[in-house]
Amino acid sequence: MIDEKRIRDSLQVVLHPKLKKSLIDLGMIRNISIKDDVVTLTLALKSERSPLREVFVGEIEKAASGLAEVSAIQEEIDSAKRQIYHCWAPFLLILT
Protein backbone atom coordinates (compact mmCIF):
# COMPACT_ATOMS: atom_id res chain seq x y z
CA MET A 1 0.00 0.00 0.00
CA ILE A 2 1.26 3.45 -0.93
CA ASP A 3 1.62 6.17 1.69
CA GLU A 4 2.44 9.89 1.64
CA LYS A 5 6.06 9.33 2.69
CA ARG A 6 6.73 7.10 -0.33
CA ILE A 7 5.09 9.68 -2.61
CA ARG A 8 7.22 12.47 -1.11
CA ASP A 9 10.36 10.34 -1.42
CA SER A 10 9.65 9.61 -5.10
CA LEU A 11 8.97 13.29 -5.84
CA GLN A 12 12.20 14.38 -4.15
CA VAL A 13 13.94 14.04 -7.55
CA VAL A 14 11.76 16.75 -9.14
CA LEU A 15 14.01 19.82 -9.06
CA HIS A 16 13.39 23.47 -9.76
CA PRO A 17 15.67 24.13 -12.77
CA LYS A 18 16.83 27.56 -11.59
CA LEU A 19 17.09 26.93 -7.86
CA LYS A 20 18.41 23.36 -8.14
CA LYS A 21 16.30 22.30 -5.16
CA SER A 22 13.51 19.77 -4.84
CA LEU A 23 9.96 21.06 -5.25
CA ILE A 24 9.19 19.12 -2.06
CA ASP A 25 11.94 20.96 -0.13
CA LEU A 26 10.79 24.29 -1.58
CA GLY A 27 7.24 23.63 -0.38
CA MET A 28 5.87 23.80 -3.92
CA ILE A 29 4.23 20.38 -3.67
CA ARG A 30 1.51 20.39 -1.03
CA ASN A 31 -1.66 18.64 0.09
CA ILE A 32 -0.75 15.14 -1.02
CA SER A 33 -3.70 12.81 -0.69
CA ILE A 34 -4.16 9.21 -1.74
CA LYS A 35 -7.42 7.51 -2.57
CA ASP A 36 -7.10 3.91 -3.67
CA ASP A 37 -4.32 4.11 -6.28
CA VAL A 38 -4.82 7.76 -7.30
CA VAL A 39 -2.60 10.50 -5.88
CA THR A 40 -3.79 14.11 -5.80
CA LEU A 41 -1.49 16.98 -4.95
CA THR A 42 -1.27 20.75 -5.16
CA LEU A 43 1.51 22.40 -7.14
CA ALA A 44 2.13 25.95 -5.93
CA LEU A 45 3.34 28.36 -8.62
CA LYS A 46 3.83 32.13 -8.77
CA SER A 47 1.41 32.34 -11.68
CA GLU A 48 -1.01 29.99 -13.41
CA ARG A 49 0.78 30.95 -16.64
CA SER A 50 4.21 29.93 -15.35
CA PRO A 51 6.41 28.70 -18.21
CA LEU A 52 7.59 25.92 -15.90
CA ARG A 53 4.09 24.59 -15.25
CA GLU A 54 4.15 21.88 -17.92
CA VAL A 55 7.76 20.98 -17.08
CA PHE A 56 6.88 20.46 -13.42
CA VAL A 57 3.73 18.48 -14.21
CA GLY A 58 5.66 16.22 -16.59
CA GLU A 59 8.45 15.65 -14.08
CA ILE A 60 5.98 14.92 -11.27
CA GLU A 61 4.16 12.36 -13.42
CA LYS A 62 7.44 10.80 -14.51
CA ALA A 63 8.65 10.47 -10.90
CA ALA A 64 5.33 9.04 -9.69
CA SER A 65 5.19 6.54 -12.55
CA GLY A 66 8.00 4.65 -10.83
CA LEU A 67 5.57 3.61 -8.11
CA ALA A 68 3.70 0.49 -9.16
CA GLU A 69 0.89 1.17 -6.70
CA VAL A 70 0.00 4.51 -8.35
CA SER A 71 -2.29 4.34 -11.37
CA ALA A 72 -2.80 8.09 -11.78
CA ILE A 73 -1.64 11.41 -10.40
CA GLN A 74 -3.75 14.55 -10.44
CA GLU A 75 -2.14 17.95 -10.03
CA GLU A 76 -4.07 20.99 -8.89
CA ILE A 77 -2.37 24.32 -9.58
CA ASP A 78 -2.39 26.99 -6.88
CA SER A 79 -0.91 30.32 -7.91
CA ALA A 80 0.46 33.07 -5.67
CA LYS A 81 -1.93 35.53 -7.30
CA ARG A 82 -4.89 33.42 -6.26
CA GLN A 83 -3.47 33.03 -2.73
CA ILE A 84 -3.05 36.81 -2.39
CA TYR A 85 -6.57 37.40 -3.69
CA HIS A 86 -8.00 34.96 -1.14
CA CYS A 87 -6.13 36.72 1.67
CA TRP A 88 -7.44 40.12 0.64
CA ALA A 89 -10.89 39.12 -0.56
CA PRO A 90 -12.65 39.84 2.79
CA PHE A 91 -11.13 43.32 2.88
CA LEU A 92 -12.12 43.98 -0.71
CA LEU A 93 -15.69 43.05 0.06
CA ILE A 94 -15.80 45.43 3.03
CA LEU A 95 -14.31 48.31 1.03
CA THR A 96 -16.59 48.02 -1.98
Image (cartoon, grey):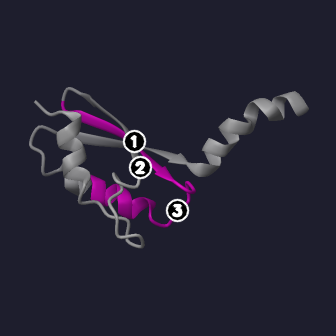
Q: Tell me the number on the disc at residue 27.
A: 2
Kind of residue indicated by mark 3: Ser
Q: Residues within 10 Å of mark 2 (few under 14, many from 20)?
A: few
Q: Earlier in the sequence, mark 1 or mark 3?
A: 1
Where residue 32 appears, as percent x and y from the top left, is 33, 36
Say which quadrant the N terminus sits in: top left
Question: Where 62 falls versus 29 (above or below)?
Answer: below
The residue nearer to you, when weighing 78 against 20, is 20
Mark 3 sits on what residue? Answer: 50
Whether residue 59 appears in magenta in the rendering, the answer is yes
Q: Callout 3: helix, strand or loop?
A: loop
Position of residue 5 in the picture relative to residue 57 (left or right): left
Q: Residue beneath label 1, please?
A: 30
Left or right placement of residue 74 versus residue 84 in this view = left
The residue carrying pointer 1 sits among few (fewer than 14), some (14 to 19) or many (20 or more) residues within 10 Å by Cα, namely some
Q: Which residues are magenta?
A: 37-60
In this rendered view, identify the residue nearer to me: 33 or 36: 33
Q: Nearer the viewer, residue 20 or 51?
A: 20
Tell me which residue sits at (35%, 54%) in the image. Answer: 25
Q: Secondary structure at mark 1?
A: strand
Mark 3 or 2, nearer chain start: 2
| Amino acid residing under circle 2 | Gly
Confirm or deny contact between disc 1 and disc 3 (CB under 8 A): no
Q: Residue at x 28, y 42 (%)?
A: 73
